[in-house]
Image (cartoon, rainbow, N blue to C red):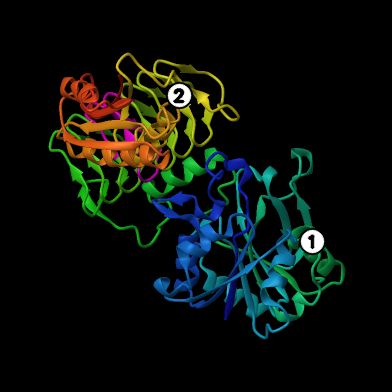
């Protein structure tokens, strides 16, 4: 049997999580949402899968490849223009479909038994079966009412409270016979719930609803995203394949993570692979920590989701926060419930992020700033780049090799043509790494470079005069913060 995973969604209501990722790639329990769907369809015997893609398709293709690592055959159908849910499935299957088809959204979280739904579909001789579930608030979903035998009698899309006639909603999981796809026009925008199913109902085609047991969430907004992570930690849904083992009751830790004996962990919580949790740090209940996250001493994290590659500074407090990939939270930052920090953003020390504030990717938040409103269009509330001694920041985060090369190239643009610059560093490994990047920046702008190796700042100053250089750049650890580097700019 063939399955189609609809994975073209933009996830607009999840922004800024989906500014740089398609919604199916947003992590749940440290794995993309679509990973859980692929494992679910594989578990129920579907090994021939096609994913429909539209928004940022390469992110999905590069991650999943041909599906071999997941034990199935995975193909892709990329839309140049949106075709709607039904139109995209028709585009993916073409006219070659000869067997029953499973259609499922790649951006939901569920453990519904697909085999039971398929058995129901076949027992009823259904042309199309909609998998249904019951929800407490049905206003955001399509309502479905069935008779006692499961045959669908009525649809209503996203009703008001005065229109609610059922708590059974459409999960976006469908089982279709090949002849149903013939009702979908080629190359046109056509939707399952708005167009296809009402047309089949009008024709009195055998259209059934299967009320499924189990967990289902469409992760439609940021609150539901956080709730889904909590539901996993509570055990409300079982997700397969998380690379973590029990560390203490209620706490799971991935391979290669270093947890200080003086760190405090309170479950339920999940910590990914390759993490460092320093002495005095606290990771509290309902926290989901991604891979390669560094949590500094004295920091406290509760009910928060931290994506891979992020860094939480010493003494910072995060409460109900989502921090996306490669974010840097400086020392003594306070961020509160509902705050979201976009990819590669930097939050300076002692900054306060108020509840519900959203910071879009690649923003710089000034040290000591109090952020009351979302930061979307501006580059951030950036402080002056230069401090009293030069430019300082967290090593390999705020001050990366790319940053060092760009700064050196900018400095070189102020120097006389074909002049020389002196570059040196202290003896630390990170300083030597950045020194090479700085040298590349000078050279790219046509400035000759004297590599003086490891020197102190006074000797570097003397070398500029002795060598008749136009300028110099010294890289060393900050005298104020042990985890920051300092770029000192020297002239003649």
Kindly indicate the quadrant of the structure image that contains residue 154: bottom right
Q: Which mark is residue 19?
A: none
List x then y, in percent, for residue 443: 37, 41
For residue 96, above or below residue 345:
below
Please say whether residue 148 is visible from this viewpoint: no
**Front residue (pair 103, 315):** 315
Q: Are marks 2 and 1 in contact (CB under 8 Å)?
A: no
List x then y, in percent, for residue 429: 18, 40
Looking at the image, residue 303 sits to the left or right of residue 85; the answer is left
Please tell me whether residue 310 belongs to the stretch shown in magenta: yes
Q: Secondary structure at mark 2?
A: strand
Quadrant where the image shows the C terminus: top left
User: How many numbered discs sit on the rendered protein?
Assistant: 2
Residue drawn at (47%, 33%), measured in percent from left and top? 341
Looking at the image, residue 79 sits to the left or right of residue 394; the answer is right
Q: Which residue is mark 2?
A: 365
**Front residue (pair 165, 53):** 53
**Front residue (pair 84, 454):** 454
Magenta part of the chain:
294-316
For residue 468, above or below residue 225:
above
Please tell me whether residue 99 belongs to the stretch shown in magenta: no
Q: Provide the major secondary structure of the magenta segment.
A: loop
Q: Residues within 10 Å of mark 2 (few under 14, many from 20)?
A: many
Q: Which mark is residue 189?
A: 1
């Amino acid at each position: 049997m063939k399955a189609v995973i609809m994975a073209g969604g933009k996830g607009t209501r999840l922004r800024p999580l989906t500014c740089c990722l398609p919604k199916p790639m947003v992590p749940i329990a440290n794995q993309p949402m679509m990973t859980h769907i692929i494992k679910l369809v594989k578990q129920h015997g579907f090994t021939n899968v096609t994913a429909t893609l539209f928004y940022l398709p390469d992110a999905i293709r590069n991650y999943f490849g041909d599906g071999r690592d997941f034990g199935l055959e995975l193909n892709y159908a990329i839309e140049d223009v949106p075709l709607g849910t039904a139109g995209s499935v028709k585009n993916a299957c073409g006219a070659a479909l000869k067997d029953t088809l499973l259609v499922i959204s790649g951006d939901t979280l569920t453990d519904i038994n697909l085999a039971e739904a398929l058995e129901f579909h076949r027992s009823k001789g259904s042309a199309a079966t909609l998998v249904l579930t019951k929800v407490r608030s049905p206003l955001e979903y399509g309502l479905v009412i069935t008779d006692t035998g499961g045959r669908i009698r009525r649809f209503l899309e996203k009703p008001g409270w005065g229109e609610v006639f059922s708590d059974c909603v459409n999960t976006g999981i469908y089982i279709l016979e090949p002849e149903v796809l013939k009702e979908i026009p080629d190359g046109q925008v056509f939707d399952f719930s708005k167009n296809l199913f009402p047309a089949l109902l009008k024709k009195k085609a055998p259209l059934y609803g299967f009320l499924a047991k189990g967990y289902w969430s469409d992760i439609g907004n940021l609150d539901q995203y956080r709730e889904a992570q909590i539901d996993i930690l509570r055990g409300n849904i079982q997700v397969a394949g998380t690379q973590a083992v029990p560390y203490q009751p209620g706490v799971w830790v991935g391979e290669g993570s270093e947890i200080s004996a003086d760190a405090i962990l309170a479950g339920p919580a999940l910590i990914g692979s390759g993490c460092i949790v320093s002495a005095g740090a606290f990771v509290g209940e309902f926290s989901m920590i991604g891979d390669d996250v560094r949590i500094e001493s004295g920091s406290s994290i509760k009910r928060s989701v931290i994506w891979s590659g992020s860094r939480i500074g010493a003494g910072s407090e995060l409460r109900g926060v989502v921090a996306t990939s490669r974010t840097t939270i400086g020392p003594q930052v306070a961020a509160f419930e509902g705050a979201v920090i976009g990819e590669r953003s930097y939050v300076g020390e002692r900054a306060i992020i108020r509840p519900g504030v959203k910071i879009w990717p690649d923003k710089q938040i000034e040290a000591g700033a109090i952020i009351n409103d979302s930061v979307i269009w501006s580059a951030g509330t950036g402080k002056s780049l230069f401090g009293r001694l030069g430019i300082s920041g967290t090593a390999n985060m705020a001050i990366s090799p790319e940053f060092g090369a760009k700064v050196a190239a900018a400095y070189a643009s102020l120097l006389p043509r074909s002049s020389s610059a002196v570059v040196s560093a202290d003896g630390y490994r990170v300083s030597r790494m950045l020194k090479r990047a700085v040298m590349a920046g000078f050279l790219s702008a046509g400035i000759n470079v004297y590599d003086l190796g490891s020197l102190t700042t006074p000797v570097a100053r003397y070398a500029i005069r002795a060598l008749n250089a136009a300028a110099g750049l010294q890289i060393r650890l900050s005298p104020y913060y042990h985890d920051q580097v300092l770029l000192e700019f020297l002239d003649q």
